[in-house]
Amino acid sequence: MTSRHLTVAGRVALLIRAGLIAGLVVTGLTYPFAALAGMGVKVGSEALENMPERLTETAPAQSTYVYANDGKTLLTMFYEEHRKHVDLANMSPFMIKAIVAAEDNRFFEHHGVDAKGVARAFVANQKAGGVSQGASTLTMQYVRMALQNSARTPQEALEATEQTAARKLREMRLAIEVEQRLSKEEILERYLNAAYYGHRAYGVYAASQVFFSKSPRDLTLTEAALLAGLVKAPSAYDPATKDRKAATERRNYVIDQMLKMNAITAEQAVSARRSKIKLKLSTPPNDCVSVSSRHNDWGFFCDYFKSWWREQPAFGRNPLEREENLRRGGYRIVTSIDPAIQRYAMKNVLGKERRGSAFAHGQVVVQPGTGRVLSMAVNRRYSLDQSANGRHSDWRQDRDVKGNYPNTVNPLLGGGDMAGYQAGSTFKIFTMLAALEEGMPLSTTFYSPQRYVSRYITAPGPATCGIHWCPKNSSESMTGNQSMWSGFGKSVNTYFVQLEQRVGAEKVVRMAERLGLRWRTAIDKKLATKEHASEWGAFTLGVSDATPVEMANVFATLAAEGKYCEPLPVVSIRNPDGSHALYQKRLIAAPRCHQEVKVNVARAATDAARCVTGYGSARGSCGGWGTSEMVYGTLGRPVAGKSGTTDGNKTAWFSGYTPQLAASAFVADPDNPEHVVGSGRSTMSKYTVAQTLRDALKDKPRENFKPPTDKYVW
């Protein structure tokens, strides 16, 4: 036998000089042997000198798997080519034997190019007057796959498969090089993980899942023979069609070849040939629109995760490159979504506003201290099919324009280019935090009339007095002296406008930015600038847009005693080799936290926010009542928060938190901001948050808030 230490060029030159095919080298299936008839030994040898001597191999694309926070519940997958690498040791022995029998029964005898096979194919094709046999070895086929996979341009991809003599010579030369560098087992493993089996299944793992819904290690003889037979022509031998004659004949051919190789016994062959093809077809999910119909509500969280991924510089130079990496990188991603909390959230959301409503009712739950997003629930189905959607709620639209209910893929809860909704009085939290940080204690008191003439100048409108902005309270019972406890608990507008004037509107706006709010509309971007922020008096009443993710995270920061963490949809991200994904030597999935406000500032704000829920303050008087006392009554454990409605009840919010969890819920019409939710929906978000926190914490220990020091009280 020829030594394995001959040079690559030398091995191919030996074939040419031996005259086995009169100076000809053939393609595998479709290119006639006569294509090289005039090349001859000298020309063939010279052609070798200009060819690469080593195969450039790029790791093939692999599917990314995305799980819930238990690491077991599959949310979806992302892939261009459905593939997952599996070691040879984890494949059925039948699969290994079958692929050799089907594609190259002399695989263990040759060194990349099968001289006998080339000669045999040449003679057969000469007699047939065309191509009746191929001569590609399994190694040569792998070379072709590797060249295609590593192609950087369409031209390179074309050259990897074009029917030319030069391509065949290159395959031969590189096949011999591969056999010098890799063992037969390594070549087989790479081949089986690269081959295409049809139905978007690349590699034996994906094929086993798609056709039989099982692992490659569990493939039977008949199943392995069927898959091995598909590699030659996946469409022609597709067993998923009604007529399985071609698939059966091809499978049986592979079984016969396995018998000839003594890879199976005669009894096994007879039994296998008699077996009918039995499939257990599955269609692996791909992207967020393929989330299981049983858990369709996960689609909105999936979309948020995908938007987050596109923003991470670790995964590429731009959003498109990062998304391509997601589809090709073969990551194992454990996300932060908690299936149990999501189930509770959806139950409580849908119990108040069904999917057929034009009003979106949604809720986000965030874990304090990590920023991990545990739930994103909304009364919508995540679907591209809007054919049965209701009419658009804006009467100015054409009658044929449909609304986003019940089906939509719009990021209604946050992420992407979602601007959000006006959050109303929940924004008073930013004014209170800015004031506390500036040294104003919770006992800071202002006389708060029913209507207050502010120093802020504004355009003429219902809330103006001459040239000044003159906001008023929602109830005359709020008139009188108010502190931060009572002013926040009762949501006294005229108190907070005075507090904002004292601390400075710009500091209030900057506090919101520090806690994660981003400005997405043209008017918000303009007013938030240094030039205009100091005069943005209405900011404290929540005239700016915010997303539920942002607002839930604001209150999670208070629950974590001032430690701000970026909203995070992942728990872990592992590379295909099992290692953790890193960026600048840090875990990409690790919480990204820092102390944004002082601990006692956060504790003081919480003490006032307890007044809202009916739980009551630890250090001062709430003034007799709060706007959302049903929250503590429903939850029955320490809770703080803030409600918020906009002028005319166009939106209705509530954000609440315990030391363990924070949640924010809203009701609004995403299609038409002028569509009033009405007073009947004003308490909806309060009950949704309270019930979800109650359900999510039912088996958790009761934890208490810590009161602030005297410095922030008196």
Image (cartoon, rainbow, N blue to C red):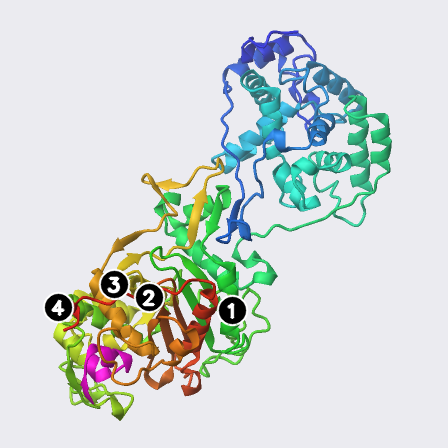
- Residue most extreme to the front: 701
Q: Which image quadrant is residue 227 in?
A: top right
Task: Please give the name of the residue rendered at 22% of the width and 85% of the height, measured from the top-left corner.
Answer: 471
Query: Which amino acid type is marked by label 1?
Result: Met
Q: Which image quadrant is residue 421 in?
A: bottom left
State the SS at label 3: helix
Whether residues under marks 2 and 4 lie with C-beta atoms below 8 angstroms apart, the answer is no
Per the image, is 136 magenta? no
User: Disc 3 designates what residue?
Assistant: 513
Residue 258 x %, y %: 78, 26
Whether residues under marks 4 and 1 lie with C-beta atoms below 8 angstroms apart, the answer is no
User: Disc 1 designates what residue?
Assistant: 346
State the SS at label 2: loop
State the SS at label 1: helix
Q: CA distance from mark 1 to mark 2?
A: 27 Å
Task: Please give the name of the residue rendered at 14% of the width and 71% of the height, measured from the top-left corner.
Answer: 440
Task: Please give the name of the residue rendered at 38% of the width and 59% of the height, measured from the top-left corner.
Answer: 367
| Nearest to N terminus: mark 3 or mark 2 | 3
Query: Which amino acid type is marked by label 3?
Result: Glu
Q: CA distance from mark 2 to mark 4?
A: 25 Å
Q: CA distance from mark 4 to mark 3?
A: 20 Å
User: Between tags 3 and 2, which lies in front?
Assistant: 2
| Nearest to N terminus: mark 2 or mark 4 | 4
Task: Please give the name of the residue rendered at 54% of the width and 10% of the height, measured from the top-left corner.
Answer: 7
Q: CA distance from mark 3 to mark 1?
A: 30 Å
